[in-house]
Image: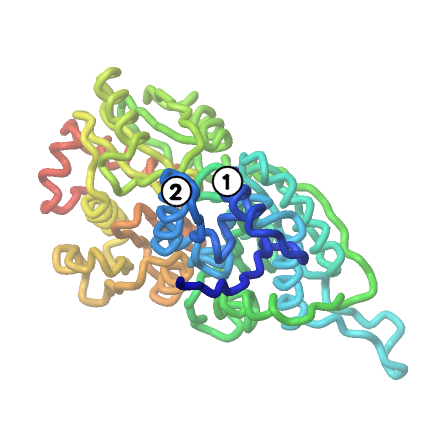
Amino acid sequence: MSSSITTSVEYICPGELHSISRAVHFSRLAAFYPKCKECPLRCETGNLPKRITEHYKKFEQHQKNEQHLTRRTLFTTEGVRGVYINKLDRTKAAQITSALASLLWEETPFVGRSENDPPHTARRVRQTVVVGYDERPSSPDLFAGVTAALIRMGCEVIDIGMTSKPCFWFAVQHLEARAGVYISGSGCDAAWTGLDFVGENARPLSLGTTSMNSRSLLSGALCATLNRLEKRLSQPIGRPIRFAGHQRTFQATVPYLAGLWKHFHELRPLSIVVGCTMPQVVKTLSTLFEQLPCRLQLLTLPRRKKEINNDEDVDLLQVGQTVKEFNADMGMLIDDDGQRCRFIDEQGIAIDACDITRLLADLQLSFHPDGSVVLEQNVSHLKESLPLLPDSTCTTVLPRLGIVYETMQTTNAIFAGGNSGYYWFRKTLPTCDAILTLANILTLLSRTDASFSQIICGRQNHVST
């Protein structure tokens, strides 16, 4: 008779201190207990039904393939993202924001007075930080944590409320703030939330970007990357001053809208379909088009992750179908960050981002013949076809917001674009705004009686002035 020796295994659910029996382990697996997804022994299913075993095997494989589920950090290429409450809540958002404030104070510390100083010696001003958020239900909760952390760290908080990301960037520039924090889960599913950061002049903070000048962006070392912010988060963070900061509000929508008006002029009566999730963008477009000869058909889309570069994206197909139903001249799908976008011609066919980049670069060069252009690396082949003067430059860069911004500043470029769906224009500073992109496309269509598809087919010809 053979005998087997059973090795004792201790079953402890993630987050718990006490062990459970093997029977409880199996019962929780069978009930799909939430913590089982994080359990290293979740594939030890014993004699449980095959459907349960297959469920955990599929989850194991999915966890290996899904970057968002395997990454050990909440930091992404362009900011912070995580599932609301499970990965990112008010407390975590406050910790990350405190790290940002700590870096701000490190560059301009609060200076006291010595006995030999005059009685009214000026001290360094408080760190001014603009805070806004998108329309996700989770955003106000994180907003409360972010503002509380900044006030505790002695910063002056400027609350611009619920707004679009382009309007948030505008507010940071307009108010000459030291930094900005935008609560948004853009680029992710509805259950996700996150934080996006900008420095002075609304320069986006991205992972891996390098500063072009030690004092030009965010006034110091913070201009390096998000990497330093992540590193600071792992270190102890103390209050830089004894006194708390304060909070005030600012209505950024009015000056932001006023700055857009000048870009919508000399347009012919076109019919446009725009699909968008953000109510702030919808409201801005409605206000703008009330005074324009163009007819606007707005589609309010459900909040979900959009794959703008995928021609089979559900929202993209819906906009294309609406263009055909209304016999419109063009369509546009705006992502939930209010910046990235995709265009559809009058036939309801999605236009490649490379073609839009080519047309917009030509248009901007017709306004500024001696201007320089920045292209993402994936469309570097367009460089040969652009009508650049000998003194002009065309620089290719990685498709990251911080890198594109820095390069535009360094080269004084008038336009930047690529396959990502982000199109940049130079106002006073580099600006990425889907509404501004729409204004330029309408200007392009108003220069000729040709249809959108005909203009695309003739894109090798330089745009006439």
Q: Residue at x 44, y 63 (%)?
A: 4
Residue 310 vs residue 159, the one in the foreground: 310
Q: In this view, does 131 lie to the left or right of 420?
A: right
Q: Which mark is residue 102?
A: none
Identify the colour scheme used.
rainbow
Whether residue 176 appears in this view of the structure is no
Q: Which amino acid does label 1 sit on?
A: Phe
Q: Is residue 312 left or right of residue 47?
A: left
Q: Which amino acid does label 2 sit on?
A: His
Residue 92 vs residue 255, the one in the foreground: 92
Residue 260 vs residue 381, the one in the foreground: 381
Quarter of image, res 270: top left
Helix, strand or loop for disc 1: loop
Question: What is the distance, in whole Å, between disc 1 and disc 2 at their CAs?
Answer: 9 Å
Mark 2 lies on residue: 55
Dot 1 and dot 2 residues touching (CB under 8 Å): yes
Q: Which residue lies furthest to the front in this view?
A: 1
Q: Residue at x 12, y 55 (%)?
A: 385
Q: Residue at x 77, y 74 (%)?
A: 111
Image quarter where the C terminus lies is top left
Residue 134 vs residue 403, the one in the foreground: 134
Image quarter where the N terminus lies is bottom left
Mark 1 lies on residue: 32
Quarter of image, res 50: top left
Residue 127 vs 89, above or below: the answer is below
At which x and y percent is residue 25?
A: 55, 48
Local crowd at mark 1 within 10 Å, few (<14), some, or many (≥20)?
Answer: some
Quarter of image, res 77: bottom left
Q: Residue at x 57, y 60 (%)?
A: 10
Which mark is first along the chain, 2 or 1?
Answer: 1
Helix, strand or loop for disc 2: helix
Residue 337 vs 79, above or below: the answer is above
